[in-house]
Image: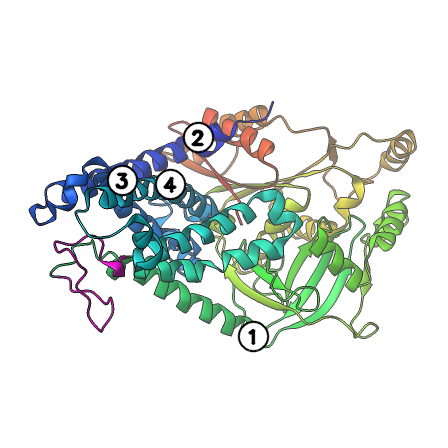
Amino acid sequence: MGESWIKRELLTPRRLVFNVIFYGLQLFLFAYGWFLQETNTRLSGLNTLKFSVWISRGAGLVLAFDGGLILVPMLRNIIRVVRPKLTWLFPADENIWFHRQVAYSMAFWAMVHTSAHYVNFIQVERTQIRPQTAQQIHYTQPGGITGHFMLLIMLLIYTTAAQRIRTQCFEAFWFTHHLAFFFMLGLYTHATGCFVRDTLDPVYTDVFPFYDSTHCLGYMSWRATIWPGVIYFGERMWREIRARKRTKLDRVLVHPSGAMELRIIKPSFKYTPGQWLFIQVPEISRVQWHPFTITSAPKDPYVSLHIRQVGDWTHALGERLGAGPEVVARMRAEAMRGIQMKEGARFELDLAVNADLPRVRIDGPYGAPAEDVFGVQVAILVGAGIGVTPFASILKDIRYRQRENRLGLLQRVEFFWICRDAPSFGWFQSILAELEAAQADPNFLHINIYLTQKINEDMMWNIVVNDAGGNYDPLTLLRTRTLFGRPDWMTIYGQIRRAIEAGDYIPGSAAQLQTKVGTYFCGPGPIAKAIKAATLYHSGPAVKFTFAKEHF
């Protein structure tokens, strides 16, 4: 049975701390808004409605706070800058998860706020504390109009954000999420109806926010919540300008696993290892931007991405580049027979031959936890399947830094790659072979490759025949031997901890107070859960294991 949603989203240790603080703040704001309304003697007339108005005002203050906060996790460029210093304060590496938590909170408090106001409006009509009907407040006053307008937008955004709809019809998700612009306008103008006032009739002015604040006693929260909107709008404009800078798809390599390697030339694009970007191919979709990890190193003359064909957009891209299912199936069959493996198991669509490559746009780069590897003494890099892509960039950069003797704190690297089938090894083999050959210190880089596929009899005999007396593994053509099955993470981390404590793993570790071992993972959740459990179990005074997972 899989991990429950409640345990995954709310009860993991770091998320539990965040949720206690976040939802504790929500309850505090609700209580504070209730208190401000109930104790304001100038609003004694409105307070005759009692609990409904107190609840609506408390929930309104929470919604004002959440309305500004929901844009903060989407400020990708700002997060990229502040992430290294403020990851401990808020979940910068999980900004989409953070965004969802605020959205869940907004959905709850919107229901509370709306339900309480419906009671308020009916009570106003019944008691006639103001000469108005509930229908007039609902549909003729700015507060009622903007409130119902925002509820409609929320309904569209929330329904199309469901994972099934998002994956099957990304355009619906994209277009409805951009209705957030009009939602924010509704939020900023929601109080212009001056419902919270000490007079029978609203007191309006000719300038924004179109009411007299001496009699209209709302929170005036728009003065604070408007700034995240302004910053977000400015960032979106900057991202659009940046994405329009000269970009050229220069070369395409296709591997037997079905992964396409796109090499892009963009002189203005600067990044660090482990970062990722968004790519758009206008010929396929003018609205879809998809995130992919950068697999080149900063010193490479191009920006490369490895894209696996698993969805509608990626399949359409494969067909457009001439790397459709038939091509991949033929390459996979040839690789399994061992025909292409010695040539790197790939073929090339060269721009000189196929000049009709589509125009692309890229936006980024954005930060990821894996870019921190040079700040730890031991880095454990774990990729599952195509999840190895962040480490292609990092391992390439390690190769360059070794030549220049610029490895920072890093003294040893453990690289784990878990693959389902043999052809998947092809595209990364050349990088690993170069790294193996470049190692002056045989203990610096340790490569661990696991094949989880059940191998057939023909493949087994091929391995046995080619492996006998050979210096290279018959599947990967590396000196490192391929291991079969799934890694036992508890055993692996226990062995690393004991070796460090004995002083046998890295030079001088026995004299250090604590050795920091960073684990960086990209791949499926169940593997992440097992690795994280092993890091927590084996951390101690002498060896501190940390864990970070790639998030888009």
Earlier-in-chain disc, 2 versus 1: 2
The residue carrying mark 3 is 25
Residues at marks 1 and 3, CA–CA distance in whole angstroms = 41 Å
Q: Where does label 4 land, which residue? A: 111
Residue 169: x and y, percent? 64, 52
Q: Nearer the viewer, mark 3 or mark 2?
A: 3
Q: Of the residues shown, which amino acid type is indicated by label 3? A: Leu
Q: How many marks do you count on the picture?
A: 4
Q: Is residue 346 left or right of residue 330?
A: left
Q: Position of residue 67 (x, y in %)?
A: 35, 52
**Marks 4 and 2, how far apart in space?**
27 Å
Q: Nearer the viewer, mark 1 or mark 3?
A: 3
Given residues 352 and 109, the one toward you in this image is 109
**Residue linked to disc 1:** 244
4 or 2: mark nearer the eye: 4
How packed mark 3 is, by other alpha carbons closer than 10 Å (few <14, some 14-19, many 20 or more), is some
- The magenta span reads 191-213
**Left or right: where does residue 369 sit relative to residue 82?**
right
Instruction: For marks 2 and 1, give the CA distance.
Output: 41 Å
Residue at 26% x, 57% y: name it: 191
**Residue with the mark numbered 2:** 12
Q: Quadrant of residue 445?
A: top right
Whole-angstrom CA distance, mark 3 to mark 4, is 18 Å
